[in-house]
């Protein structure tokens, strides 16, 4: 047995369960590819300052959860705890925003890393699929992304999720609310760390999950009561567009996101079958992030959906994703000559796009047929000495149990015909 184990708070994706994760990624990505979003991939680590400026120096992500290290050359880097800031950095660095076709619409799939207390649904290494629309301020973009996420989840068969929606205002109206919220928080019985957080970013306190804090926030002022006319009109249009698309949502005036860069539209996907880690994804508008990291004004919106938690949500609803069998044909050779002939036929089937596997290691018939069963193949080819003498191979339908002798030279054509 290996003396090494996966690091605490991480996990290995192994077959057959890994097929669920691939199915989730594909289901989330499919509507994006059909809506003008191109794939983007960024490094797994970035300059620490990218996250300190963009995500926020007072956030738990930056102060407590980032994996930070110094290179041999003296650079301070961090494993990415989220991907929006790196995507925007990549777009700016490549000048995609200057190509004359805004918004720049991209999607990504990859790993994030946060040093958190491990528990079910919360890992130190986790996977997300995300989408960003960069360079346009348009309620239709916000609505588009919410609709596409909803479409992804419904394509997977999920039904017991809810969409929470709120507006965080903008640089015109949020400072007024911020001051009112700080005045309210100063009058509460909060610990020193929370009071310090309230002075730096009071909206973060609203996201505190501790019951003793939430109990005191019952009468906290609500941001929706402080929205300027422009933000009210913007938010109302988002609501109207997603309603017209048949997407059901809940207004949540206390919804905030844990990152400093969010403005106006903010939303979260939650699943009530997951316990305390109920958020399966979320996002919103981040109109000021580009300036925060040294770029021009590029109003943008995006989201990230957790692959790990989406798989847990599917399990909570008892849903098995529609996963095609990894193997359609399994070949069982009995003897060296049969091995040579069937290996050549399996190679030809694969070249023609048929998923095929082979009994390796010189197994006997009984062990090889067990392997064929485990593979999930629809058909098994069995070739023995008597078959060789007659120039045929035994083709077994693994569903019906029916076995037919066909010519060795007919294998590829026959299987392509049967598999469509």
Image: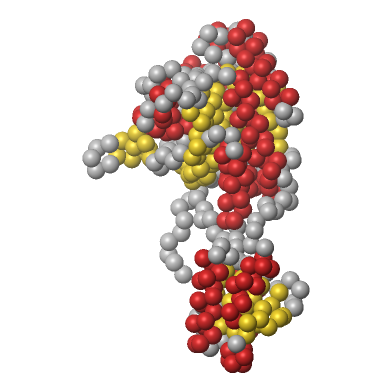
Please tell me which residue is depicted at 74% across the width and 40% down the height of the picture: 159
| Residue 358 percent location from the top left of the image | 55, 75
Quarter of the image for residue 270 reads top right
Relative vertical location of residue 203 with respect to residue 123 in this rendering, above or below: above
Answer left or right for 404 relative to 8. Answer: right
Q: Does residue 336 appear in the picture of this structure?
A: yes
Total numbered labels: 0
Please tell me which residue is depicted at 68% across the width and 83% down the height of the picture: 405
Quarter of the image for residue 100 reads top left
| Residue 162 percent location from the top left of the image | 71, 33
Compare residues 350 and 293 and report the one nearer the observer: 350
Please tell me which residue is depicted at 64% across the width and 76% down the height of the picture: 380
| Residue 273 percent location from the top left of the image | 71, 42
Relative vertical location of residue 168 with respect to residue 172 in this rendering, above or below: below
Relative vertical location of residue 367 with respect to residue 105 in this rendering, above or below: below
Compare residues 73 and 182 and report the one nearer the observer: 73
Which quadrant is the C terminus positioned in?
Answer: bottom right
Quarter of the image for residue 313 reads top right
Compare residues 171 and 355 and report the one nearer the observer: 355
Q: Does residue 121 appear in the picture of this structure?
A: no
Compare residues 277 and 366 and report the one nearer the observer: 366
Please tell me which residue is depicted at 70% across the width and 41% down the height of the picture: 154
| Residue 98 percent location from the top left of the image | 40, 24
Residue at far left of view: 73
Answer left or right for 104 relative to 312. Answer: left
Answer left or right for 43 relative to 247. Answer: left
């Amino acid at each position: 047995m290996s003396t090494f184990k996966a690091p605490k708070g991480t996990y290995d994706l192994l077959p057959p369960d890994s097929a669920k994760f691939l199915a989730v990624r594909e289901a989330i990505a499919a509507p994006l590819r059909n809506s003008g979003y191109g794939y983007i991939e960024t490094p797994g680590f970035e300059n620490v300052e990218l996250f300190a400026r963009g995500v926020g120096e007072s956030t738990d992500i930056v102060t407590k959860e980032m994996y930070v290290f110094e290179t041999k050359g003296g650079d301070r880097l961090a494993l990415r705890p989220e991907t929006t800031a790196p995507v925007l950095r990549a777009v700016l660095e490549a000048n995609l925003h200057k190509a004359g076709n805004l918004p720049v619409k991209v999607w990504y799939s990859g790993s994030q890393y946060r040093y958190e207390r491990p528990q079910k649904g919360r890992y130190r290494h986790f996977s997300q699929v995300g989408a960003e629309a960069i360079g346009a301020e348009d309620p239709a973009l916000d609505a588009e992304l919410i609709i596409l996420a909803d479409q992804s989840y419904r394509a997977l068969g999920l039904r017991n999720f809810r969409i929470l929606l709120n507006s965080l205002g903008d640089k015109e109206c949020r400072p007024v609310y911020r001051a009112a919220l700080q005045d309210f928080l100063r009058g509460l019985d909060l610990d020193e760390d929370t009071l310090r957080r309230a002075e730096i970013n009071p909206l973060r306190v609203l996201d505190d999950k501790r019951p003793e804090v939430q109990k005191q926030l019952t009468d906290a002022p609500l941001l929706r009561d402080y929205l300027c006319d422009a933000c009210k009109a913007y938010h109302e249009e988002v609501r109207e567009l997603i309603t017209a698309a048949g997407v059901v949502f809940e207004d949540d005036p206390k919804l905030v996101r844990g990152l400093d860069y969010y403005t106006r539209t903010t939303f979260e996907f939650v699943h009530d079958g997951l316990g305390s880690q109920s958020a399966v994804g979320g996002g919103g508008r981040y109109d000021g992030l580009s300036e925060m990291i040294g770029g021009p004004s590029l109003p943008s919106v995006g989201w990230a959906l957790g692959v790990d938690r989406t798989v847990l949500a599917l399990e909570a609803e008892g849903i098995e994703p529609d996963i095609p069998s990894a193997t359609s044909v399994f070949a069982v050779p009995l003897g060296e000559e049969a091995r040579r002939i069937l290996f050549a036929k399996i190679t030809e089937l694969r070249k023609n796009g048929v998923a095929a596997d082979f009994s390796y290691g010189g197994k006997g018939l009984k062990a090889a047929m067990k392997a064929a069963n485990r593979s999930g193949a629809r058909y098994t080819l069995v070739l023995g000495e008597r078959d060789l003498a007659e120039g045929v191979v035994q083709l077994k339908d693994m569903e019906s149990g029916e076995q037919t002798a066909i010519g060795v030279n007919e294998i590829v054509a026959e299987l392509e015909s049967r598999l469509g």
